[in-house]
Amino acid sequence: MTLPTPLQTWVEGAAGSGFDVDHLPYGVFARSGEHPRVAVRIGDFVLDLSIVAAADMVDTHALYDQPTLNPFMAAGPTVWESTRAWITGLLTDETERDLVEPALSPVDSVRMLMPFTVGDYVDFYASEHHASNVGRIFRPDQEPLLPNWKHLPVGYHGRSGTVVVTGTDVVRPSGQRKAPTEDLPTFGPSRRLDIEAELGFVVGAPSAMGERVATADFARHTFGVVGLNDWSARDIQAWEYVPLGPFLGKSFATSISAWVTPLAALDAAWTDLPGQDPEVLDYLRVEGPAGLDIEVEVLLDGEVVARPPYRTMYWSPAQMLAHTTVNGAGVRTGDLWGSGTVSGAEPGQRGSFLELSWGGTEPFVAGGRERTFLEDGDEVTLRYSAPGTGGGRISLGEVTGRILPAR
Amino acid sequence: MTLPTPLQTWVEGAAGSGFDVDHLPYGVFARSGEHPRVAVRIGDFVLDLSIVAAADMVDTHALYDQPTLNPFMAAGPTVWESTRAWITGLLTDETERDLVEPALSPVDSVRMLMPFTVGDYVDFYASEHHASNVGRIFRPDQEPLLPNWKHLPVGYHGRSGTVVVTGTDVVRPSGQRKAPTEDLPTFGPSRRLDIEAELGFVVGAPSAMGERVATADFARHTFGVVGLNDWSARDIQAWEYVPLGPFLGKSFATSISAWVTPLAALDAAWTDLPGQDPEVLDYLRVEGPAGLDIEVEVLLDGEVVARPPYRTMYWSPAQMLAHTTVNGAGVRTGDLWGSGTVSGAEPGQRGSFLELSWGGTEPFVAGGRERTFLEDGDEVTLRYSAPGTGGGRISLGEVTGRILPAR
C-alpha cells in the first residue's frame, strides 16, 4: 500500500512551514489606506482572496471583500468546502501562478485585524486536570471536582465586546480585591493577574432558537478554531464570583489569534477523548474520535513555561456546542466559545500561572528568576500545533499580549 | 408660586394616556411589505420618524430610516436631546399637524420589532429583598446575603443572542435537572420555570476599552430604559450554577419591551436610594437621588399577582454601569443590563414566582387556584409606570410572553 502523495504548493517556503497547503487559515488584513479584506495564509504570505476571487470570476467573491469573516462563515459548509478546494487548486497548480502572485503579500507587510465580529462568547471549564487543580488550590478540604462537573460541560457567558486580536496590549485591570486575611475589600490594580491558555471555537452557520445542535452536527455549524487567552484577575474573581460566577475578573480582555484554522485542516488531529465516566446523558453522546490532538505552548517573554496537551481535555467541542443549545438557545455566526484552560497531568503541562505557581505558593522559574503571577511588561504568547493532513504539522493561530501598568 | 403649565399635544387621546408628550418612547416598527423604521409613540399612535424627518428636512433624518435604534443611540446625548425637542415641538404645535399627520399610524396597525441589536447583556442582582429571599430559600441555614453583596453590585453576563421582543412565545427549555433528593441528574423539560421582573438599561454612547465610566457620567452613556423579563429555569440553574454561575438556566430567552423610554422622560422619577451601609468604595459613590421611583406590575393571564416597587432597589443603575467598566471593560452601543429581579419588602411585592411561592412550598392563588411555577400556556405580562414630567404618570414598555410546551 502506498500513501497518496501530499499536495505540493508552488509558493516558495510554504512546504513544511506550518502554513503549508494543508492548513490555509483565514483572517482579515489591512494595508494602510486600504479597506480591510479577507485573506488566507500560505507560508509567509497572505493571499488577498477578494482580488483573486474577482480575477478568477468566482461567484462568492463578494464574501471576501469584507471587513470580517462573518459573511463567509455564515455561508455554511458547502461554501467553506468549495472555497478551500478552489484555493488549494490555485496554490498547487503552477499554471495559476500569474493569477495568484499579484494577490500575495508578505505577512509582515500587512496588519492583521480582528478576524470576525463576536456574537456571544461562552467560556467552558473542560479540562479535568485544570478543574481539579483549581479545586485543590481554592477548596483544599473538599473534593476537588464539584458534583456536576462530570455530568455536564460547565460553562458561562463572558464579555464579547472585549475580545481582542493578538498583539493588543492588555492594561492591568483594577477592581475590588479582598484577601482571605482581610476584613474589607480594597480598590486597586489586580495583584494576581493570570492567563488561561485555551482553544476557541467559532460558529459559522447559525441555528434557530428552539432548535438543538446534535453532537453529530458539530461540523455543520462550527467554522474553525482560534488560539485564545482568557486573561484573568484571580483576586477580583475570588471576591466577586459567588454566587453568579466570574464577571470583572474576566471581562477586561480576552485575546484571540488573527488566523482562524478551518475545521477541515484538522482532519488528521481528531483523537479519542481520554474517557468519560460516568456515562453522559444521551444528548452529550459522541461517536468516534471526538478529541483534538493539539499541542499548546505557553511562552513568557519568549521562553516556554508550559506545554499543555489539548488531547487530555475531558469534554469535546461537539459536546460543548450540543450543551449550549440543548435548552433551545440558538447560536449565531461569530459566536465564540473557549474550551477553558488546557492543563495536562504533569506540572509542566499547566495552562495558567495560578496552577504553575500553585496559587502563588510555589513559584516557578522563568527568565532566570522566580515567578508567580503576571508583572507589568510581561509578554505572553500561546502557540498551537497539530498534525496536518499532509503528514507534517500545522501551526494554529498564535496569540500574544503584553501587560501594561494599571491606569 | 405657580407651576409651569405642562405641554399639551394636539394628538387626540394622548393627554393622560401614559404616552403623553412627556414620554415619547422610541421603537422600531414594520408594516407588511415595508422595511423597518424608527418610530416614537404618542398616545395610541406611532409616529414614523423617518418620514417626518425627511419632510421636515432634519439633518439627522438618516438615523431614523434604520431597522434598529443603534445608529440613533450611538449618536450621543446631544442628538438625543435635539431629537426630543424637535419631536416635542411637532406634537405640541398645532401648525405642524399637516406635516405630522401623514406619518402617524394606529399602534395596532403596525408590528413592533426588536428595538435594538444587543451588544453584551449583563444581569445584576440589585434588590436586597430579592437576594435575601433567594438566600433564605436556597441556603436556609446561612446568612441570606453573601459577604460581597453590599460591597459591589453582583452581576454576570447573560446571552445577548436570545434577547427577544415582547410578544415572542417562550418554549419551555429542557436540560439537566437534579433535585436534592435525587442521586443523578435526569434530562427533560424544566419543572421550575420562572420569571424575573426587571428593568433594563440600554447603552447609547460607547466607552473605550481602558476607560471607566464614572457614576456621574451615567446619563452621557445610557440611552434609556426597557421592561425586561429574565425567564429562568430554576431546576436547571440549581444544578449547573456552582461554581461559574447561571448558564442554560437563563440563556434560552430574555424578553424586553418594544418601546425604549429615554432617560429624559424619567426626570421626575429620580428618588433617593433606600440607603447603603457599609459605605461604598469611591468609584461607586453617587450624589443626589440615584434611585428610580418606578412601579412594576406582574400579571399572570391578565391578573395582577405582584407589585414590585423599583424604588426599593439597593444598587443604582449608575453604580451598575460604573462597576461594569471599572476594570477597563468598554461598553458598546446596544449593551443592555438588567437590574435583577425587583422585589419589595412585602410578600405581594415579589418579582419572581420562586419568591411568590417560597420555593414552591407556599402556593399563591391566581386564576382562582393555587400556583407555584409557570405552566404551559401561561401568559406573563410586566407593566411599568413612573411619574412623568407633566404631572401625570408615564407607562413604560410592557413585556409579554407566553409559555409553549417543551419540544
Image (cartoon, coloured by chain):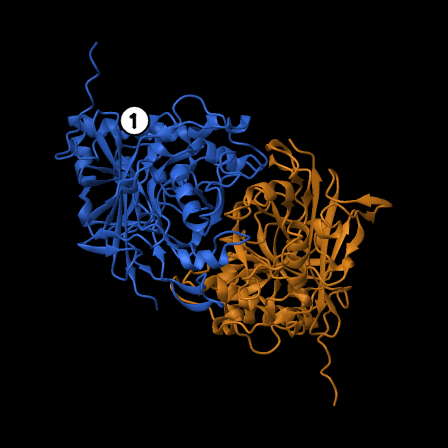
Chain colours: A orange, B blue
For the C terminus of chain B, give its image quadrant: bottom left
Q: Is residue B297 visible?
A: yes
Residue at 53 percent across and 74 percent down: it is A285
Compared across the picture, whether A395 is left or right of A153 comes to right
Element type at mark 1 = helix
B168 and B65: which is toward the camera? B168
Compared across the picture, whether A361 is left or right of B373 comes to right
B59 and B300: which is toward the camera? B300
Tell how many labels. Answer: 1
A116 and B272: which is toward the camera? B272
> Which residue lies most toward the left here?
B12
Q: Quadrant of residue B190?
A: bottom left
Q: Residue B220: horizontal and vertical position, in percent?
A: 44, 29
Q: Is residue B33 visible?
A: no
Dot 1 amino acid type? Ala
Q: Residue A354: horizontal and vertical position, in percent?
A: 70, 49
Q: Residue B6: horizontal and vertical position, in percent?
A: 20, 22
Q: Which residue is mark 1?
A: B85
